[in-house]
């Protein structure tokens, strides 16, 4: 038996840790049904390389916020998220994913 | 003079400074020595709790006086004032943009609580009494500099805020004023004030006896962080900017000495006010700058504050500030 899967959109936001609370408040205001926050360990970008282990405060740390959305909602969420983070260090990506329980998103 | 030299030698050869130097050296030679993040955070919480509680217990024992109110006012005025001096000097003597200069200025108007803790410990080693309430002054000096620096930048006409959020906001100030270290510091101060001598005796084996040992381990980690910062971000700093990181603490120290003399602080209280004035933030303000001025480069303000000014204050600054405190302080 093949398990049925359903197409959704996945929004990944890699952003500076100080912005995290504002971003999560925004996602809550936008009634996003769920998200997951992951700590980033190290990386390299336009501002050079960084490592979480060498940080004394949250200022230089990065986090990843991942959320799955229905395709119909992606523009409603993406625009305000972009407005919030566009001057910060980070990356926003949207990708296609398949989920098993569509009613969750 | 002899007193100053003996203080300086005693400080340079103290376990705290030597562990800091060890951490810096290990980072500069790319050793894999590291302190796990959770332990570093735990130690920071311990130090805030211990210094806040001890301050509150000391005030409960000695009582409050008008000097406390004057010290709080002086702290707030200095924190508002220093960014203006720093901004002017940076714009006149370096190639930093207005945004970077404002971000750096905010750091030099705010304070480093670890430098304060190290100075308290050095005072204790030198047998100079600490009035206790300077912990509250430290908390007051955390945030006015942020408002002041953003105001200077807004007035400069060189700040393109676009249509995005950023700059000063009540959300930003709430996040700065209620940041974890300030809440714990002031909370522990109040607990110490309420429970007094008896409360201190009850938890002294936890907050007093291990304090210097924990501080050594914490400073080892700070040395590692400062060394890594210098290795990675040092190239972002020009010569004029590095010089600023060395002379600005001295300018702030001299101004704070005048304030300490004017309000009649004790030698220990004066030394701590001068230390707070001369220190630069690397925890609360960098996080605030990422929200208020995301265009400002962390490689400049963090490296300067943590890699240049913090080591300078820890090694040379603190003994100097204690001597200035003795000169300015009321007997």
Image: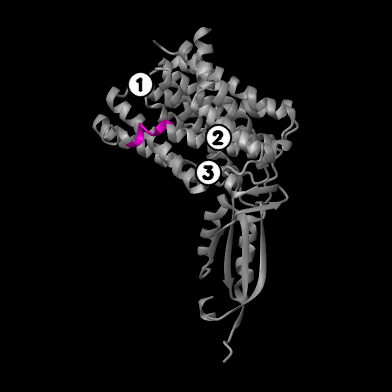
Q: Residue at x 71, y 47 (%)?
A: A48
Residue A22: x and y in percent read 54, 55
Give whichever of discs 3 and 1 has the lower sequence position: 3
Which of labels 2 and 3 is toward the front?
Answer: 3
Q: Is residue B255 above or below residue A57?
A: above
| Element on which disc 3 rests | loop
Within the image, what quadrant is residue B309 found in?
top right
Query: Is mark 2 in CB contact (under 8 Å) with mark 3?
Result: no
Chain of the residue under the numbered disc 1 shown in the image: B
Q: Chain of mark 2?
A: B
Residue at the far bottom: name it: A1
Do labels 1 and 2 touch, CB within 8 Å?
A: no
The quadrant in which residue B127 appears is top left
Residue B72 or B8: which is nearer the viewer? B8
- Residue named by callout 3: B35
Question: Which residue is identified by label 1?
Answer: B66
In percent of the image, x 53 and y 68: which residue is there? A32
Evaluate whether label 1 is on the same chain as label 2.
yes
């Amino acid at each position: 038996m093949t398990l049925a899967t359903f197409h959704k959109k996945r929004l990944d936001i890699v952003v500076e840790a100080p912005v995290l609370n504002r971003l999560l408040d925004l996602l809550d205001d936008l009634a996003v049904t769920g998200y997951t926050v992951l700590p980033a360990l190290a990386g390299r970008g336009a501002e050079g390389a960084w490592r979480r282990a060498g940080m004394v405060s949250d200022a230089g740390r990065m986090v990843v916020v991942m959320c799955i959305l229905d395709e119909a909602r992606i523009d409603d969420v993406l625009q305000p998220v972009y407005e919030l983070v566009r001057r910060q260090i980070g990356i926003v990506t949207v990708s296609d994913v398949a989920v098993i329980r569509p009613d969750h998103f | 003079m002899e007193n100053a030299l003996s203080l300086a030698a005693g400080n340079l050869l103290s376990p705290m400074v030597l562990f800091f130097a060890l951490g810096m050296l290990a980072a500069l030679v790319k050793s894999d020595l590291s302190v796990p993040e959770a332990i570093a955070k735990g130690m920071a919480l311990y130090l805030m709790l211990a210094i806040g509680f001890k301050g509150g217990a000391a005030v409960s024992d000695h009582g409050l006086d008008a000097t406390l109110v004057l010290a709080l006012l002086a702290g707030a005025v200095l924190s508002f004032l220093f960014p203006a001096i720093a901004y002017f000097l940076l714009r006149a003597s370096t190639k930093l943009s207005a945004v970077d200069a404002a971000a750096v200025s905010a750091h030099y108007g705010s304070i480093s609580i670890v430098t304060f803790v190290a100075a308290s410990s050095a005072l204790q080693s030198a047998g100079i009494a600490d009035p206790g309430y300077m912990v509250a002054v430290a908390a007051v000096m955390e945030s006015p500099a942020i408002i002041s620096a953003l105001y200077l930048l807004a007035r400069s006409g060189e700040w393109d805020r676009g249509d995005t959020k950023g700059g000063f906001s009540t959300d930003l100030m709430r996040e700065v004023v209620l940041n974890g270290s300030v809440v714990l510091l002031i909370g522990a101060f109040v607990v110490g004030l309420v429970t007094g001598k008896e409360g201190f005796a009850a938890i002294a084996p936890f907050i007093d006896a291990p304090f210097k040992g924990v501080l050594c381990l914490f400073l080892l980690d700070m040395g590692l962080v400062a060394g890594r910062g210098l290795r990675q971000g040092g190239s972002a700093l020009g010569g004029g900017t590095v010089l600023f990181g060395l002379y600005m603490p001295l300018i702030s120290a001299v101004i704070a000495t005048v304030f300490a003399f004017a309000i009649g602080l004790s030698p220990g209280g004066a030394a701590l006010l001068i230390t707070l004035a001369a220190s630069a933030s690397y925890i609360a303000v960098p996080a605030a700058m990422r929200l208020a001025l995301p265009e400002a480069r962390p490689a400049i303000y963090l490296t300067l504050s943590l890699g240049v000014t913090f080591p300078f204050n820890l090694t040379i600054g603190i003994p100097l500030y204690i001597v200035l405190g003795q000169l300015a302080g009321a007997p």
